[in-house]
Amino acid sequence: MKNPTPLHFYMESIPYLLVSKSKDGATATIFYLKDPKSIMYAQQHQGWGTANFTMSLSNGVLSAYGMQTDSKGPETIAAVSSLLSSAATAGLKAQAGADYSAQGAELDAAVTSFNTSVASLPFTSDAGFSVNSLVTNLKTAAQTLQDPTQPTTSALAQLKGAPAQLAKLNGNSAIQNASVNQMKVKAFDDAKDAFNKSLIAILKEVGTATEANFQLYQIKQRPDGRISLIPARLPNG
């Protein structure tokens, strides 16, 4: 190269915690990635006399330049180790389970379709309450399943119990004046059957959902000095 090129490096690194699962249990590994927001450039300029400027880089991150820098590594590791030995460990294991985001999206679409189909029907008070409760609970379950940071136990239980709740409803008992509203009775039963088929299909997918083998967290220090773990989303593909 004819012209000198400035050396680019990074002043800061971001610590991450990788939790890996296997048949023998779970292991935790701490590693560092350079912070793209902290990029800087260095270029030597010759002046009077001689100069001996040295820089040490570790994975592109500045670690020393004539004096040793403190990475706070031991303190961070100690703080994270404390988290892992506390109740947070249970949360890590729960979050490192299967990914139900696709099933959550399908459930949300199915609930919306069912609710749209039956919203204008003249329900009895009891049936109207049951339908509204079922729709509300399943909407909440769908949102939970789509959020990888949320525990899914209660959402999955709600999903698995939905077909039985739906089976208790039928057009003849749910629609007011059913004898003179047979078209509306049929409309409800058709919507219920289609909804039930969707629920069964989603439940089959849930049963075969692939369990994630790892979970990634960013280690972040709060203003009060406490260490917290922030779930990091991994790119698809």
Image: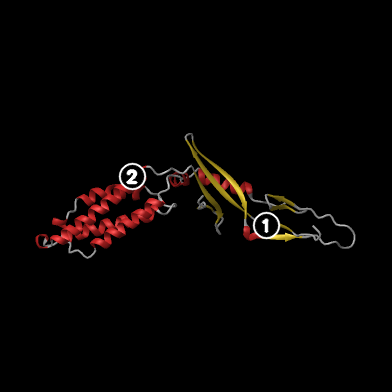
Res. 235 mark: none
Q: Is residue 204 left or right of residue 52?
A: left
161 or 81, nearer to the observer: 161
Indicate the quadrant containing the N terminus: top left, top right, bottom left or bottom right. bottom right
Residue 177 locus on image (x, y percent): 11, 62
Q: Residue at x 38, y 42 (%)?
A: 208
* Residue on which the image places disc 2: 204
Q: Is residue 69 left or right of residue 196?
A: right
In the figure, residue 131 lies in which quadrant? bottom left
Whether residue 25 is situated above or below residue 100 in the rendered picture? above
Residue 126 locus on image (x, y percent): 17, 58
Residue 41 locus on image (x, y percent): 72, 60
1 or 2: tag closer to the N-terminus: 1
Q: Amino acid at mark 1?
A: Met
Distance in Å between CA atoms under marks 1 and 2: 49 Å
Res. 11 mark: 1
Residue projecting furthest to the right = 49
